[in-house]
């Protein structure tokens, strides 16, 4: 069994693909050109803020958006909240004509984030006049706890963004604003808080440098993905998707944001990633909530595999874009195959020990230790090398040693993808495709309940 070519070659194939992808992402991040600002007044801006039981954060989010971007409209979608989310926004809308409340009630409500965003799209269509230049109208999706860089509209208006008429969508970088919080879990002890600090730090490191590098690499391959927070799209591009798919955001999709980007590219619009502006959100300090979130993402990735035939045959995807997108789609599948191969190898090893004895079974394996060590170094080093990059851009007050240790921790952190992929696959087999909403962190609560999972 150990001599099976597939069994031996598959891990090496995965490692080669990972190293090529990492090298491309790192190069794209470190060699990204400077972003030239544009004129935000050249476009009309509308923020969509989907909310469900967000009393704790929605007021602050709306106030900040209005203060930092006074010319923009803010559309808050209350997806049948059971707290004061709708009331808070309604009170603000009474005195501010650029704040709008989109109220949804069951049974139409609570059908997922995509359905909520589609409701805001419908309301915006009714609000705009018929002679509006929809190529100049930009919709930006912000999480209920999101905080957007005050310079963001200038950055995405420039020649690398909507100053280019071929650009239909832009994704900006995502930061975790509680990465420096010394006590993410105020009611817990030192050990739990140490784990929580590291978990939040890893999420910030993942999004702000590693994922940003991946997105910049996708900019070169023509396959940039849209995220659920800090996603900018031309209204005309949403119209083109709606004409082909009936609605811009796919109802029931667990990755409605990423699928929106796929539809945008399939319709001929380009998407850019701008790493030099950002939106911030809460990093999750709770291991269980984090795994729930990542399980949903893995299951959403598995759902996206159905787009593979359309992407392969699309004239709007080049060869590099097809390869990059298929690589992204198949990540959870690769994790599942790896888990299965590990189970097979351990089973075969157990049978060999039973038949030949412990010494005989492991004697031959000792000769492979140099190869094992070399593979371990090659596997770990790419994660470690993100540490100094993260220190430079996000934590300049930290030491080089600490940044290298963060890189090592990022390698360990990456293994969450395996249980998340397995759980997502099991959920899909069981037909469980519901949208689980992640709870807000307790430290931001000012009154009332926090958002809950469904």
Image: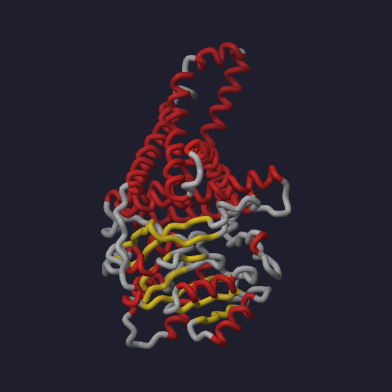
In percent of width and height, residue 265 lies at: 33, 62
Going by the image, does 440 lie left or right of 14? right
256 w.r.t. 199: above or below:
below
340 w.r.t. 345: above or below:
below
Residues 306 and 102: in front is: 102
Q: How many marks?
A: 0
What colour scheme has been applied to the protein in the rendered image? secondary structure
Image quadrant of residue 40? Answer: bottom left
In percent of width and height, residue 50 lies at: 54, 71
204 w.r.t. 259: above or below:
above
Query: Residue at position x 44%, y 68% from top?
Result: 150
In percent of width and height, residue 16 lies at: 37, 35
Query: Residue at position x 47%, y 23% from top?
Result: 373
The image quadrant where one finds the C terminus is: bottom right
Query: Residue at position x 37%, y 78% from top?
Result: 44
Please, which residue is most extreme toward the front here? 397
Going by the image, does 419 lie left or right of 237? right
In percent of width and height, residue 56 lies at: 64, 69
Query: Residue at position x 50%, y 86% from top?
Result: 97
Going by the image, does 83 lie left or right of 380? right
Residues 346 and 261: in front is: 261
Q: Is residue 92 visible?
A: yes
Image quadrant of residue 382? Answer: top left
Q: Is residue 336 visible?
A: no
Residues 396 and 132: in front is: 396
């Amino acid at each position: 069994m150990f001599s099976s070519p597939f069994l031996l070659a598959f891990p090496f194939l995965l490692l080669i693909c990972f190293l090529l992808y990492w090298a491309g992402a790192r190069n794209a991040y470190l060699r990204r050109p400077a972003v030239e600002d544009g004129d935000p007044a050249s476009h009309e801006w509308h923020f969509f803020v989907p909310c469900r039981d967000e009393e704790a954060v929605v007021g602050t989010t709306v106030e900040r958006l209005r203060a930092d971007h006074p010319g923009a409209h803010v559309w808050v979608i209350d997806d049948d909240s059971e707290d004061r989310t709708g009331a808070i926004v309604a009170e603000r809308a009474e005195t501010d004509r650029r704040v709008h409340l989109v109220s949804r009630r069951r049974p139409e409500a609570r059908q997922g984030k995509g359905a909520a965003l589609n409701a805001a799209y419908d309301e915006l269509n009714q609000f705009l006049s018929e002679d509006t230049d929809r190529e100049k109208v930009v919709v930006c999706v912000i999480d209920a706890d999101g905080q957007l860089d005050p310079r963001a509209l200038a950055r995405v208006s420039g020649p690398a963004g909507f100053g280019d008429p071929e650009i239909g969508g832009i994704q900006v970088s995502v930061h975790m604003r509680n990465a420096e919080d010394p006590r993410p879990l105020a009611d817990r002890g030192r050990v739990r808080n140490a784990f929580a600090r590291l978990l939040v730090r890893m999420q910030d490191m993942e999004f702000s440098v590693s994922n940003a590098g991946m997105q910049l690499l996708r900019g070169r391959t023509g396959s940039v993905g849209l995220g659920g927070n800090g996603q900018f799209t031309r209204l005309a591009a949403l119209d083109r998707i709606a004409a082909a798919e009936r609605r811009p955001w796919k109802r029931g999709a667990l990755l409605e944001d990423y699928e929106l980007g796929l539809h945008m590219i399939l319709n001929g619009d380009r998407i850019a990633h701008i790493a030099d502006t950002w939106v911030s959100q809460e990093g999750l300090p709770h291991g269980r909530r984090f795994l729930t979130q990542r399980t949903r993402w893995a299951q959403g990735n598995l759902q996206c595999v159905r787009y593979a035939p359309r992407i392969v045959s699309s004239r709007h995807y080049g060869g590099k874009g097809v390869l990059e997108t298929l690589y992204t789609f198949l990540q959870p599948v690769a994790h599942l195959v790896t888990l299965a191969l590990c189970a097979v190898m351990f089973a075969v090893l157990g049978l060999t020990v039973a038949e030949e004895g412990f010494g005989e079974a492991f004697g031959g394996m000792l000769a492979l230790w140099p190869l094992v060590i070399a593979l371990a170094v090659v596997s770990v080093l790419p994660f470690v090398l993100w540490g100094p990059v993260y220190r430079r851009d996000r934590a300049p007050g930290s030491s080089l040693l600490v940044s290298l240790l963060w890189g090592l921790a990022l390698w360990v952190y990456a293994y969450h993808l395996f249980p998340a992929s397995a759980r997502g696959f099991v959920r899909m087999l069981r037909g469980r495709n519901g949208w689980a909403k992640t709870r807000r962190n307790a430290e931001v609560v000012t009154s009332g309940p926090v958002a809950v999972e469904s």
